[in-house]
Image (tube, grey):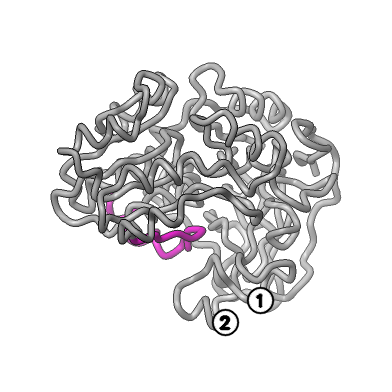
Amino acid sequence: MRAMTYRGPYKIRVEEKDRPRIEHPNDAIVRVTLAAICGSDLHLYHGLMPDTRIGHTFGHEFIGVVDEVGSSVQNLRVGDRVMVPFNIYCGTCFFCARGLYSNCHNVNPNATAIGGIYGYSHSTGGYDGGQAEYVRVPFADVGPSVIPEWLPDEDALLLTDAFSTGYFGAQLGDIVEGDTVVVLGAGPVGLAAARSSWLMGAGRVIVVDQLEYRLAKARDFALAETVNYLEHDDVVVHLKKTTGGLGADVVIDAVGAEADGNLIQHVTSAKLKLQGGSPVALNWAIDGVRKGGTISVMGAYGPLFSAVKFGDAMNKGLTLRMNQAPVKRQWQRLLEHIRAGYLKPSDMITHRIPLEHIAEGYHLFSSKLDGCIKTVVVP
C-alpha cells in the first residue's frame, strides 16, 4: 500500500509499505477513505515527540470502510463505513471501566501515563496511523463505530479527534451559565472548544491568536470575540481589563507545546528541546483566569519539564483539568448537536489534498500558508 512515512524532522514522504494484516482475532483492517492532518501531528513533524522512529506512519484522525475482520470481531462487518477514535483502548481495564479511554492500561507498554494513539510515535505504543491506504485497528469491537447514514464523511472525520477534543475541553472547563470563556489558540481544537462553550452556557467567548485569518474564522465559525495578542503589549493585562479587572471564569489552552508569544520560552522548548513544550499558553492561562477559576488544557505537551507558574496557580486557588480526550465518550452528544443543526464540524476544513501530496499539506499547515486551518487527506 501507499503510506506517509517519517524520515526525520520536517522530512516525510509517501512510499510503499506492507499492507497491514490481522495480528489478533479482535483486529480489523480498515481501508481509509479520509484522513486529516492534526496540529498534534506537527509536534511529530517538528521532532518534538520522543521516540518517533524512521518509517512511522502518522495520522490519528481517519475514517474508512472495513476491509477485513478478525475471527472474534462481532460488532463490525466487511463493508461497514466506520469512524475510528484516535484512542486505542481495550474497554475492560481499570481506566476504561471509568471512561478514561485515553489512559488505557493495556495498549501501551512504553508509558505509565498515556494509552495508545494511532500514528503518534512509539511513546504512545508505536501503532501506525491512518495517513495511508489501509490501517490496522486493534480492539475493533471497542473503538470504531459505524457512521450513521445521515452523517457526511467530513463531519465524521472531524469527530475522530479535533472536534471531540475541543468539545471535551469545554466540558473540562465546568462552564456555568453566563461564564466568560477565553480560548487560547484558533486552530481546529480551539475553534471547536469556542463553539462548544456556547452549548454549555457561556455568556461570552473570547479567542486569542496572532493570525488574522484564524481570528476571522473564530468570529465566523465560533461566533466569538477575538484578540490578536500582537496588538497588545501584555495580552493578560488586556484580558483582565476586558473582564472587569478580574480575569476570565474559564481559560482553555488549545495551543500546547509550540506556543509563540515569548521568544526565549519558544526557543528553549520548540527549537532546543530543553522543555516538554513552550509554557507560554499555560502561563497566560494561569495569569488570565480569575482567582478560583478553571483552566482546561487540551494542547499537547511532551513528557519533559516545562517552566509553568504552578505557584501562582496554587495561590489563586485554580482548578486545572486536562487529559487526552476520551473521544468516543463525546460522540452521542455531538451527533445530537450535528443532527439538530447546531454544529457543522466540516466548516473548519480549508484544504483537501491527495495522499501523494501530503508533504505539501504538512508544509502548508506547519508554515500557516494559504489560510490553512484544517487539511483533509484523500487516499
Above or below residue 359? Residue 94 is below
Say which quarter of the image contains residue 4. Answer: top right
Secondary structure beneath dot 2 equals: loop
Above or below residue 215? Residue 334 is below
Q: Position of residue 54 (x, y in %)?
A: 85, 45
In front of the other: 173 or 151: 173
Q: Quadrant of residue 333?
A: bottom left
Residue sitting at 20 percent across and 44 percent down?
Answer: 246
What is the magenta range?
Answer: 319-337
Asked if residue 59 lies left or right of residue 94, the reply is right
Q: Amino acid at mark 2?
A: Cys
Image quarter (top left, top right, bottom left or bottom right) of the C terminus: top right
Q: Which residue is mark 2?
A: 93
Q: Secondary structure at mark 1?
A: loop
Residue position for label 1:
106
Q: Residues within 10 Å of mark 2 (few under 14, many from 20)?
A: some
CB of mark 2 within 8 Å of CB of mark 1?
yes
Residue shown at 32% from the left, 27% from the top? 227
Nearer-the-camera pick, 364 or 255: 255
Is 44 placed above or below 86 here?
above
N-terminal of the two: label 2 or label 1?
2
Residue 302 placement, left or right of 17: left
